[in-house]
Image (tube, rainbow, N blue to C red):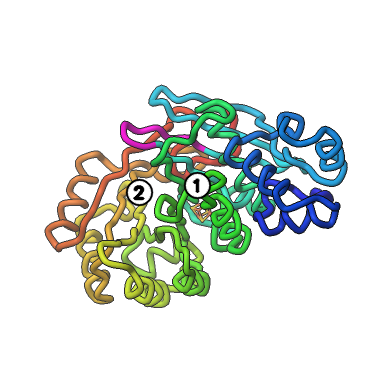
């Protein structure tokens, strides 16, 4: 780990404290916070509004850059995939996905992943380590600077999704701290409503998340309508089965404000979980738990060797969706992005193209 404090992962209060310990007034902490987040400067020397002596002192006691970009891939559909490395050599992947109305940054909460979802390439890496709050934020800053230029204004409507490598709820504290810092109006100002956290089903953390005051959107990866199949596809189901998961989801649903919904993600694997019968079972499952304020995102599996699953037929995706809708469940098909550069869902595994 970095011995010196990583300034971008400090809340404003922590920066004030750090500066005070070094005999500096509060307004210097505010300047530094704005420099790191609002202006997205990664080098202290670029903060020319700070006295040179202070920049030098800070350079001795703290760090501002810990991630390096190893490679950057551009898809034919405009998606950019960044393969970064932590200071201690672990891979971090981040994906920028432009769409007509808004841009989305899909970031990683961990290097590798401890869960063993059978359809996911990241699972093959195992868990390398959790990322710090600073590393989570630094990913976003690097991507924003690449797309909009250093200090360029972050367009309103940039969304964040914690759907890159790792299980965000197994790095809960750092994730929530990072999101809190990024929501600061003197910083990146990416408010919780523009953030979605996706979990494979860490039930106690869903319960903790439910109680948060400033809460991002929630997505739960389901991918199977029965315990038998989910045990096989997502072994975390053996720890917290569908009953435990859907009860936690129901408790979360009860706390939603007017007009809010949450999401179930369902990765469709050709011939495995994509039949009309399974769609009907899924709709029935949601009805049994009286889950009404949900939408289902259908994600066609993206082939990636050495995974043995294949994508579903296009027609099958539509038939699966139609059964859900006929049973009163809102379903959307998520268009795959960046498949050609290994940036699509389930494909992140530090792979060079
Ligand atoms: S799908 Fe997500 S939780 Fe499952 S192994 Fe992959 S990164 Fe981990």
Q: How far separated are the C-alphas under marks 2 and 1? A: 37 Å
* 238 and 193: which is toward the camera: 193
**Residue drawn at 48 percent across, 48 percent down:** 190
**Residue drawn at 62 percent across, 42 percent down:** 34
Whether residue 122 is visible: no
Q: Position of residue 196 (x, y in %)?
A: 43, 54
Q: Residue 189 carries which label?
A: 1
Residue found farthest to the top: 76
Whether residue 70 is visible: yes
Label 2 or label 1, whichever lies nearer to me, is 1
101 inside magenta stretch: yes
Position of 17 compared to 269: left or right?
right
Q: Which mark is residue 95?
A: none
Does the beta carbon at disc 2 come under 8 Å from ligand 1?
no
Position of 317 compared to 17: left or right?
left
**Residue drawn at 62 percent across, 27 percent down:** 71
Q: Which mark is residue 269?
A: 2
* 304 and 218: which is toward the camera: 218
Q: Where is residue 249 in the image (x, y as percent from the top left)?
A: 37, 71
Does the beta carbon at disc 1 come under 8 Å from ligand 1?
no
Magenta-drawn segment: 95-102
Instruction: Examine the image and state in which quarter residue 116 appears.
Output: bottom right
């Amino acid at each position: 780990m970095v011995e010196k404090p990583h300034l971008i992962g400090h809340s404003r209060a922590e920066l004030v404290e750090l500066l005070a310990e070094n005999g500096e007034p509060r307004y210097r902490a505010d300047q530094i916070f704005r420099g790191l987040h609002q202006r997205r400067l990664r080098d202290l020397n670029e903060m020319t509004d700070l006295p040179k002596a202070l920049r030098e002192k800070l350079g001795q006691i703290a760090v501002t850059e810990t991630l390096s970009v190893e490679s950057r891939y551009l898809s034919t559909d405009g998606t950019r995939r960044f393969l970064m490395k932590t200071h201690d050599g672990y891979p971090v992947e981040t994906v920028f996905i432009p769409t007509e109305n808004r841009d989305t940054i899909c970031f990683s909460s961990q290097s590798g992943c401890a869960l063993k979802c059978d359809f996911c390439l990241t699972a093959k890496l195992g868990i390398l380590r959790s990322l710090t709050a600073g590393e989570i934020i630094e990913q976003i800053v690097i991507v924003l600077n690449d797309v909009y230029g250093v200090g360029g204004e972050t367009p309103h409507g940039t969304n964040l999704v914690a759907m890159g490598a790792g299980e965000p709820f197994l790095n809960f504290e750092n994730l929530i701290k990072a999101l809190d810092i990024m929501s600061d109006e003197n910083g990146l100002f990416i408010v919780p409503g523009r953030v979605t956290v996706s979990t494979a089903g860490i039930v106690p953390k869903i319960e903790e998340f439910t109680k948060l005051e400033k809460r991002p959107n929630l997505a739960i990866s389901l991918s199977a309508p029965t315990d038998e199949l989910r045990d096989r596809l997502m072994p975390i189901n053996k720890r917290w089965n569908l009953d435990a998961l859907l009860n936690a989801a129901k408790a979360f649903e009860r706390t939603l404000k007017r007009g809010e919904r949450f999401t179930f993600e369902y990765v469709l694997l050709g011939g495995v979980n994509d039949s009309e019968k399974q769609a009907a079972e899924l709709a029935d499952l949601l009805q049994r738990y009286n889950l009404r304020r949900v939408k289902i995102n259908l994600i066609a599996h993206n082939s990636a060797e050495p995974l043995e699953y294949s994508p579903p037929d296009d027609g099958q995706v539509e038939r699966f969706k139609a059964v859900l809708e006929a049973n009163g469940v809102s379903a959307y098909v998520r268009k795959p992005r960046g498949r050609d550069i290994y940036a699509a869902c389930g494909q992140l595994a530090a792979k060079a193209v």
